[in-house]
Amino acid sequence: MQKAQLQLSQVGISFPTAKGDFVALQNVNLDIAQGEFVSLIGHSGCGKSTVLNIVAGLLQASTGGVILNNKEVNEPGPERAVVFQNHSLLPWLTVYQNVELAVKQVFRGKKSKSEMRDWILHNLALVQMTHALDKRPSEISGGMKQRVGIARALAMQPQVLLMDEPFGALDALTRAHLQDSVMDIQAKLNNTVIMITHDVDEAVLLSDRIVMMTNGPAATIGEILHIDLPRPRERLALSDDARYNHYRHQVLSFLYEKQRKIEPLHTQTKAAKPAIVTVEAKSA
Ligand SMILES: Nc1ncnc2c1ncn2[C@@H]1O[C@H](COP(=O)(O)OP(=O)(O)OP(=O)(O)O)[C@@H](O)[C@H]1O
Ligand SMILES: [Mg+2]
């Protein structure tokens, strides 16, 4: 493998809680090469967002650390754009202005006013949000907010794109469209991507490697699966491809055999409907 652009070494973190320190992550070691597409997958609460936030510089590791381009990461920077799990647009700015703010931060002095405008519009068109340029976040749906968050991150042309379940809130068609866009953009720009997902098909389709995390507390990397499928990748062709299905099976077996996680029924609140409890228990 070529030299790592991004290195996570012995990363651990504990959070102070009322019951004492809670060790969320321990001994997370991962080297990522420039241009690699890495997915993080694991059960809810295992620590995926925490890993991403440490790489983003939004959380400080309690042990170990992160090195990007030979420099330690201690704070956020425009070379690392984040698409958050809960879309985080500034509520007082319009869709256009939310993207503009990020674009100005990166391209001030490098692009003219009209070039910036074209670039903002181009990225909003990519996520099919041109119709809502002047709307504020409170006036658009959750999936639309997520799309604007993706446009904002892509518009920064970051060296490292950090995405926390970026397509989770989208309908299947939009999701497929955006997955293809992200693959195209990444092929063009060769930026490094770390993406958290719960969707096994999405992980196999997009990734060079899938990093599978163990359940917490003290979660760490359980297994790493290399996805050796040629690019560009085409979802329809792959759905009938034996290697694709083999990778898919390996991820499913990690999640549902090796790291099986069933919430005991008695922890469910009384408010939970029995039908939902049954479905969750079966699919867990
Ligand atoms: N600030 C905090 N204080 C205390 N505990 C925290 C804090 N942030 C996260 N945790 C705990 O750390 C663990 C990992 O949380 P994290 O949000 O990283 O999980 P996740 O894998 O992203 O889950 P999901 O798939 O549901 O988004 C959880 O048990 C969570 O409760
Ligand atoms: Mg999360």
Image: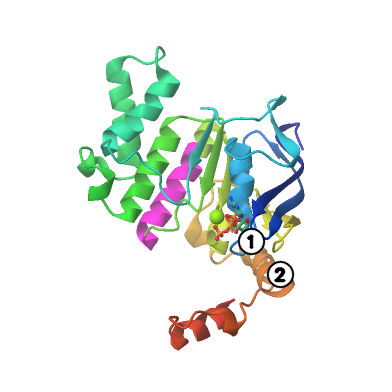
* Pointer 1 residue: 42
CA–CA distance between discs 2 and 1? 8 Å
Q: Is mark 1 within 8 Å of ligand 1?
A: yes
The amino acid pointed to by label 2 is: Gln
Q: Who's the residue at 34% across and 38% down the image? A: 90
Residue numbers of the magenta segment: 171-185
Q: Nearer the viewer, residue 43 or 5?
A: 43
Residue 94: tell me if it is visible. Answer: yes
Marks 2,1: beta carbons within 8 A: yes
Q: Residue furthest front?
A: 18
* x, y percent for residue 227: 67, 53
> Does the magenta segment cover residue 279?
no
Rendering quadrant holding ligand 2: bottom right
Q: Residues within 10 Å of mark 1 (few under 14, many from 20)?
A: many
**Where is mark 2, residue-wise?**
259
Describe residue 19's horizontal placement relative to residue 99 as left or right: right
Label 1 secondary element: loop
